[in-house]
Amino acid sequence: MKHLSVPLFVAYGVAAAAILLEPSDAERSTLWDTVLPFIHDIDNAISPAKAHIDSFSRSFEDLGQNAVEQRISIADRLDVLKDVAGEALDIGNHDHSRPNLTIYEYIKSSNYTTKFASLVDEYKGLIDLLNGTDATNYTLFVPVNEAFDGIPNDPKNKPSKEALEALLKYHIGVGEYPASSILTTNTIPTVFEEAWLGGDHQRLRTSVGLSGVRINFYSKVVAANIGATNGVIHAVGSVLKPPPMIGRVLSLFPSEFSTLLLAYEKTNFVQFIHNVKLVGSTVFAPSNNAFSALGPKANAFLFNTEKGRGYLKALLKYHIVANATLYSDAFYDKTGNDVGDEGGKKEHFDLVTLLDGTHISVDRSTFAGFTSIKVNGYAKVSIRDGVGKNGVIHVVDKVPIPPRNKAEASSQTNDLDGQLTVEELVERLDPYMDGSVEPELTGLEL
């Protein structure tokens, strides 16, 4: 299984270090914003932090991050969790086995979390939340003081009160997630309610690998299982920034998604998606290798002929699910449709895509703490849960192709495990080339 040439957490690391930058109007405008000027500006601003991120990136890339997640045994995972749980943030005589401080009292007392605590002090609502013991317990992923070292402190680019509050809320998980729970947890809801997800909780991605426990790919848990009377605290080495738009995430990785990005350009897909209204979304993003697997003739037809670009646009529509955000362990559904069976170890979903309401089939199974996702019965999700401001990205190792006709179940398309001739591709997509009207969607306009 191939891993990303430039690991996803690098992009999130860059975003995290840029917390003092306000989102521009362009960021709010469309799902598929380009980000090249953004990358240039941020890269110049955060070189100290980026050096640390790049150093980790090089060492971890050699392992193949997603492959390691899949291969590491439960015993190894437990060893990793035991190691990080053995670390603690010294605050004197506090007994971690018998907590007597709230989360807020703990971070105020620790010499390692003074910077984060000082930011929390600006928001009475957050103080009350982290100090309360009468309602829900919480999990705080608190950045240690060193996590702020690479962030430029420019008063001219100081974030708004609302933006800073959103960032702080994104560090607070809803519910109590001790280290042992992370073994069987892929994403964690936070108290930050994201308007682009219809007001649902924005989520954090968790993973356990040989290098330790990671949050959103890039932020390492450096101390775990710090008990409090109202939850649990894990210390992290990087600030967690609410994720950028899905299009922005994809554009950060031309080495992995250059073919997909070229497809958007060739089909003028930005103009199409700009007029689509969404409340959350699920994007099944084919990697460069996935497009290569179609074969040279099929790719030449799709990208280099006027007729082929029409079929290419149909494919791109088929890879996007509107108003339904399917994570590997959670589902935000704003469609009101009956999409399948949720719950249990094996789940099946038939999700409505932007291709004239055609369904895409998703099978999600969990065993011994590991989650496997297949699309249309043959395309494997190689990188799960790339969290975005307005949805989630799953990287697939094959290009999902719609069924032969609209009445056929999308789960019956598993005969496509290999290269396609141009004739086969045309036959498969012809039913969708009749100038059909785009589906009526409701929600927030991008």
Image (cartoon, rainbow, N blue to C red):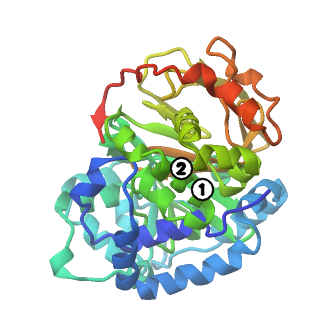
Name the kind of residue labelled 2 in the image. Ala
* Quarter of the image where one finds residue 294: top right
Badges 1 and 2: C-beta atoms under 8 Å apart?
A: yes
Q: Label 2: which residue?
A: 263
311 displayed left or right of 152: right
SS category of the residue bearing label 2: helix
- The front one of 54 and 162 is 54
Report whether residue 333 is seen: yes
Instruction: For the N terminus, give its image quadrant.
Output: bottom right
User: What count of labels does the image hold?
Assistant: 2
Q: Position of residue 198 (x, y in %)?
A: 34, 34
Q: From the viewer's perspective, is residue 54 above or below residue 405?
A: below
The disc placed on residue 234 is none
Give the left or right position of residue 6, taking residue 82 as reference: left
Q: Amino acid at mark 1?
A: Thr
The residue labelled by disc 1 is 259
Quarter of the picture containing the C terminus is: top left
**Above or below, 40 relative to 226:** below
**How crowded is the residue under tag 1: few (<14 C-alpha within 10 Å), some, or many (20+)?**
many
Residue closest to the eye, 368 or 325: 325
> Which one is in front, 391 or 420?
420
- Find residue 173 and report its horizontal and vertical position in percent: 45, 50
The answer to whether residue 322 is above or below residue 91 is above
- Secondary structure under tag 1 reads helix
- From the viewer's perspective, is residue 134 above or below residue 352? below
Residue that appears at 34% across and 83% down: 45
- Relative image position of residue 135 (x, y in whole percent): 37, 39
Mark 1–mark 2 distance (CA, rounded to whole Å): 6 Å
Residue displayed at 51% across by 86% down:
51
Q: Position of residue 284 (x, y in %)?
A: 59, 42
